[in-house]
Image: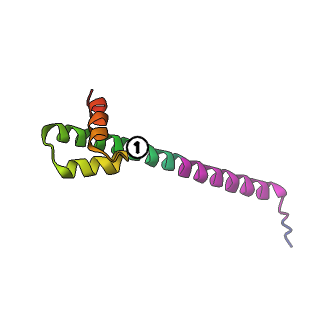
Amino acid sequence: MKFELKTENENYSKSFTQFFGIVFFITLIIILFDVALKLGIISRNHKIEYNCRLLSVEKSKPHFKKLSKLSNLKSKQQIWEFCREVIK
């Protein structure tokens, strides 16, 4: 007849492994979320700069509309002043 005894060390190692797995997963999610936000900001700034450069070459209504949406400015004069600062 064999007797097997389970020690509590196995339970502790499983709980530590699960704990570190959860912490790793949450950390990974936070890092990916931060990267996504920063890429969104970079993309928005690039769109603004690109549209300001287009506006300086070709003064058309669609460029004003795009810049108005991106910069939350309403008047053409404000958009012009904003683009002068961006292009500098």
Q: Quadrant of residue 50?
A: top left
| Quarter of the image where one finds residue 59 | top left
Report the magenta stretch's main SS. Answer: helix
Instruction: Please say if 3 is above or below 53.
Output: below
Q: In the displayed structure, would residue 3 be above or below residue 82? A: below
Q: Left or right? Give the position of 12 relative to 85.
A: right
Q: Quadrant of the N terminus?
A: bottom right
Say if 75 sits above or below 85 in the image: below
Boundaries of the magenta span: 5-30
Task: Specify whether 67 is left or right of 72.
Answer: left
Instruction: Identify residue for label 1.
Output: 41
- Say which residue appears at 54% left-offset and 52% top-offset: 29
Q: Eyeballing the image, is 23 above or below 42? A: below
Task: Name the residue furthest top.
Answer: 88
Q: Residue at the spot x=17%, y=37% of the render?
A: 56
Q: Which image quadrant is residue 47 in?
A: top left
In reply to whether residue 46 is colored magenta, the answer given is: no
Q: Position of residue 31 (x, y in %)?
A: 52, 46
Q: Secondary structure at mark 1?
A: helix
Seen at 72% across and 57% down, the residue is 14
Q: Report the amino acid beneath label 1.
A: Ile
Q: Quadrant of the C terminus?
A: top left
Magenta run includes residue 8: yes
Residue 32: x and y in percent read 49, 49
- Foreground pick, 30 / 28: 30
